[in-house]
Image (cartoon, rainbow, N blue to C red):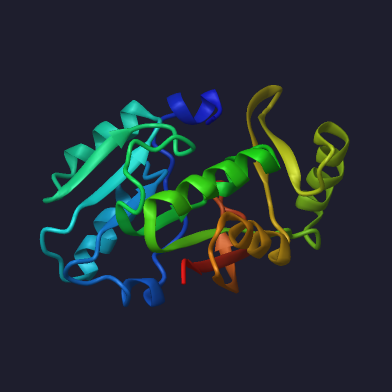
Amino acid sequence: MAEDYWKTVGRVPSSLPVDPAFVELIGPGVSVVDLGCGDGRTLAKLAASVARDRAPWAGVDVNPAALAGAAARGLPGIGFVMADIAELPFADRGFDYGVMHAVLTTLATPAERRAVLAEAARVLRRGLYASDFLLTPQQPLYRERYARGRVETGEWGTFRVMDGRRYLYTAHHFAPDELKDLFSRAGFSRVTLRQVLSPTRSGNVIGGAIVLAMKS
């Protein structure tokens, strides 16, 4: 499901920190999977912040180079797997919590976003922590992108990211209610969303959201 860009691009620095409220949920006996883990930066920071035991932790990504970088961190007890996050190689309810940092924004269509969240709900027992980007039409750059993107994709907030004339990938920014509804429809019964300011990978600061979606 991931676009080719995300399978082959070099290291993409994560611009989003781990939320302290999520860190408080993780302790001994709690298992975690990072969906779209990249080079393992988020899992490394989380592992350094909590007490752990033998509960399984894992990271999943489609980029071989990123996964090699993650494995090279030598994080004890954390395995890294190459897989599509819409088809996870894990049993139902195999992990307590999942993490998604700036992943939904890279999924080009509503159907892809629904499929990924439904798969996340399948493999998680307790909940999913996500951070992502919100619509920021008050900034002229993004207002123009959204307007052009609606013509190109048919969806407000979805736009093609270009490097000059070269197409890189399609991104989507969310309305808060749209984002909460996605999690609810995937089977998360308690969804809280906090709006923040978030830096993007290109260095812009736009509206962001921190979501904690619980199964019960």
Quadrant assignment, res 12 = top left
Q: What residue is drawn where x is 37% and y is 45%?
A: 37
Which residue is more in the foreground, 216 or 120? Answer: 216
Residue 167 on image: x %, y %: 66, 25
Residue 103 on image: x %, y %: 52, 47
Residue 112 on image: x %, y %: 62, 38
Work out whether residue 176 can be spotted.
yes
Work out whether residue 201 can be spotted.
no
How many badges with numbers are in the image?
0
Which residue is situated farthest in the front direction here?
A: 92
Quadrant assignment, res 48 = bottom left
Q: What residue is drawn where x is 49% and y is 31%?
A: 6
Q: What residue is drawn where x is 45% and y is 27%?
A: 7
From the viewer's perspective, tell me whether residue 194 is left or right of residue 26.
right
Q: What residue is drawn where x is 20% and y is 38%?
A: 71
**Quadrant housing the N terminus:** top right
Which residue is more in the foreground, 14 or 36? Answer: 36
Residue 84 on image: x %, y %: 44, 33
Which residue is more in the foreground, 73 or 190? Answer: 190
From the viewer's perspective, tell me whether residue 33 is left or right of residue 210.
left
From the viewer's perspective, tell me whether residue 107 is left or right of residue 48.
right
Which residue is more in the foreground, 55 or 169? Answer: 55
Picture layout, residue 44 above or below residue 21: above
